[in-house]
Amino acid sequence: MRILLAGATGQVGHELLRSLQKLGGTATEIIAPGRDRFDLSDPAQCRRFIHNTKPALIVNAAAYTDVDRAESESAMAMRLNADAPAVMAEEAARIGAALVHFSTDYVFDGKASLPYREQDPVGPVNAYGRTKLAGEQAIVAAGIPHLILRTGWVYGMRGRNFLRSILHLARTQDTLRVVDDQFGTPTWCRTVADMTAQLLAMAQAAPNTAQWWKEHGGLLHMTAIGSTSRADFARRIIELAGLSAKAKVEPVSTASYPTVATRPRYSVLDTGKLQGLCMPPRWDEALQRCMQQSG
């Protein structure tokens, strides 16, 4: 099976390069073009590349993810997070391919008190969330076999993310001011990649692959299990890194730590639908494995 992987240099994309290789063994061909050959801001180039390579599956792990900068660069965020997925979906329809796309918990307004289900009303409170929601809608409108996998609070040992920021600050500062009134589910990028591969392996192994996509495709929430606050997430990172004697977390309110973009207060996703197919790990157990494997 030929797979086109967009965004292979990102957190999730880097892990997908490894996990997708397990699909079909040597029969799987992963094409992971760089920006020089597959620039999401160039629709014509993306269309040509998909037309020429004709993958059976497109996996889009690329996105504009700078939440604060998206407020001033909303046009670019829309181009990468909505227009580019729309192009991929349109081309997938032309060549008969399926599409896997990663979205975000930030499509919700954060006013809930229980984990959000896939069918719950959306209402993004920042430009990043609005552009990601537009990308979801474009894929659905294309009418192709697809998986839209919403995740959140993604971290790993590469790129820019909360885990690496806290580790840096804990080594350089005695006190870290971290908000304690925002709640979500920290999710290791490897967890996302491995569960994605598990779902695709199920589709491949199904007696009728097209029927599998009809029954199990669509929108799916994909995070670890459980939830925590930003402050407690930071405390756990510091504890696992053996830095508790050096650095302390000072909890602060979101109001006292303003950012350019509004963040949802509560963005925990209900993974019940996902658990009917594969079981994600608890967030704290996955964090421990991530940090142990990184040394």
Image (cartoon, helix red, strand yellow):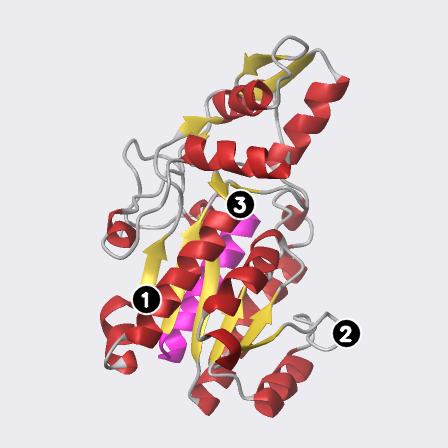
Residue type, label 3: Asn
Label 3 and label 2: CA atoms lie apart by 30 Å
- Which is nearer the N-term, disc 3 or disc 2? 2
Q: Which residues are magenta?
A: 125-145
In contact (CB < 8 Å): disc 1 and disc 3: no
Q: Residue 155 occupies which quadrant of the picture?
A: top right
Distance between the alpha carbons at the discs numbered 1 and 2: 31 Å
Please name the residue that numbered disc 2 is placed on.
36
Q: Is residue 261 visible?
A: no
What residue is disc 3 on? 126
Q: Nearer the viewer, mark 3 or mark 2?
A: 2
Question: Where 15 falls versus 82 (above or below)?
Answer: above
> For numbered disc 3, what is the local secondary structure?
loop
Inspect the image, locate mark 1, and give the three-letter code of the amino acid beneath it. Gly
Identify residue for label 1.
218
Q: Is residue 146 visible?
A: yes
The residue lying toward the viewer, choosing from 261 and 21, is: 21
With 260 as the anchor, is 201 left or right in this view? left
Graded by Cα atoms within 10 Å as few (under 14), some (14 to 19) or many (20 or more), the crowding at tag 3 reads many
For marks 1 and 2, the one nearer the N-term is 2
The local crowd at label 2, few if under 14, some if 14 to 19, many if 20 or more residues have their Cα within 10 Å, is few
Residue 144 figure quarter? bottom left
